[in-house]
């Protein structure tokens, strides 16, 4: 199944290729930088234990509301229309005090859906499907088996908490030199901190990055596969790397 929202750096076009590189058997699957969850949703179940994590609090709140309050969230979303005034009002109000988690989740859902390129910053000026009907299927996926654990932690702490020999971490961090497009802060120190963390894990990792000499040098001791996908915004080809420790 597909993700329910577009997301900057989303992996909908590479999800199947990434999953094809996963080990055959894993005990736990952890998406460290979950984003729109394209890789998570691309398979019915990855492992007995699944974990979704992201640094964006609004995104995590949206996932939790779908998981636990889907019907109420759908009703709230149904009250919105695709309009510039709606987008600008949400941008102004979403961080104000006084809203419930469900109200804030609905606002964030609409803001991402009707923004340009899912940037959440500029109005998209085109037709968008903002229907919340698909959230029923997403709720079911998030509740499959024991259900997906939804976390909101720093990546280093998360990896240390869930690391086991049978763990698989899928990491899709903000790409090098594109960090400004994300609301959650990520800098060069964080790229290096992630590298140091992955160097020391007991489990396995699959890591997505842009094809960048800085990244190639940092991960030169691991297996690096070059891939490319269509860039929908520029209508060109975008080169990426898939890096593994196995």
Image (tube, helix red, strand yellow):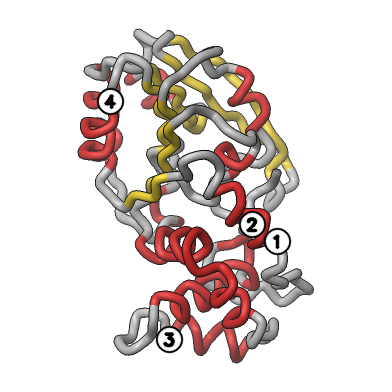
Q: Which mark is residue 163?
A: 4
Q: Are marks 1 and 2 in contact (CB under 8 Å)?
A: yes
Q: Nearer the viewer, mark 1 or mark 2?
A: 1
Q: Nearer the viewer, mark 2 or mark 3?
A: 2
* Residue 109 position in % (x across, y down): 56, 70
Residue denoted by label 1: 134
Question: How many residues crowd around disc 4 within 10 Å: few (fewer than 14), some, or many (20 or more)?
Answer: some
Mark 2 residue element: loop
Q: Which mark is residue 6?
A: none
Question: How many residues crowd around disc 2 within 10 Å: few (fewer than 14), some, or many (20 or more)?
Answer: some
* Residue 193 position in % (x across, y down): 22, 33
Taking the spot 54% from the left edge, 29% from the top edge, the residue there is 46
Mark 3 residue element: helix
Closest to the observer: 224 or 42? 42
Mark-to-mark CA distance, 4 and 2: 28 Å
Q: Counting residues from the N terminus, which is met first, the one under dot 3 or under dot 4?
A: 3
Residue denoted by label 3: 92
Does 55 sit above or below residue 146? below
Q: Counting residues from the N terminus, which is met first, the one under dot 1 or under dot 3?
A: 3
* Residue 129 position in % (x across, y down): 75, 69
Looking at the rendered image, the quarter that the N terminus falls into is top right
Mark 4 residue element: loop
Residue farthest to the front?
145
Residue denoted by label 2: 4
Horizontal side of residue 188 vs 132, given as left or right: left
Q: Counting residues from the N terminus, which is met first, the one under dot 2 or under dot 3?
A: 2
Q: Nearer the viewer, mark 1 or mark 3?
A: 1
Question: How many residues crowd around disc 1 within 10 Å: few (fewer than 14), some, or many (20 or more)?
Answer: few
Looking at the rendered image, the quarter that the C terminus falls into is top left
Mark-to-mark CA distance, 1 and 4: 33 Å
Mark-to-mark CA distance, 3 and 4: 39 Å
Question: How many residues crowd around disc 3 within 10 Å: few (fewer than 14), some, or many (20 or more)?
Answer: few
């Amino acid at each position: 199944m597909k993700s329910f929202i577009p997301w900057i750096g989303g992996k909908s076009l590479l999800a199947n290729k990434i999953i094809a590189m996963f080990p055959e058997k894993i005990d736990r699957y952890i998406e460290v930088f979950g984003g729109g969850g394209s890789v998570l949703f691309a398979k019915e179940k990855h492992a007995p234990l699944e974990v979704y994590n992201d640094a964006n609090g609004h995104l995590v709140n949206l996932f939790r509301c779908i998981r636990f309050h889907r019907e109420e969230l759908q009703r709230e979303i149904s009250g919105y229309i695709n309009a510039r005034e709606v987008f600008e009002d949400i941008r102004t109000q979403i961080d104000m005090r006084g809203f419930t988690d469900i109200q804030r989740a609905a606002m964030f859902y609409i803001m991402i859906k009707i923004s340009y390129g899912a940037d959440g910053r500029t109005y998209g000026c085109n037709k968008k499907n903002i229907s919340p009907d698909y959230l029923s299927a997403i709720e079911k996926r998030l509740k499959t088996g024991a259900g997906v654990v939804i976390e909101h932690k720093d990546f280093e702490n998360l990896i240390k908490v869930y690391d086991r020999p049978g763990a698989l971490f899928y990491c899709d961090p903000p790409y090098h030199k594109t960090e400004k497009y994300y609301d959650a802060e990520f800098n060069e120190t964080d790229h290096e901190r992630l590298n140091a963390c992955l160097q020391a894990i007991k489990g396995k990792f699959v890591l997505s990055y842009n094809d960048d000499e800085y990244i190639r040098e940092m991960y030169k001791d691991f297996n690096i596969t070059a891939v490319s996908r269509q860039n929908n915004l520029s209508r060109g080809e975008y080169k990426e790397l898939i890096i593994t420790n196995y």
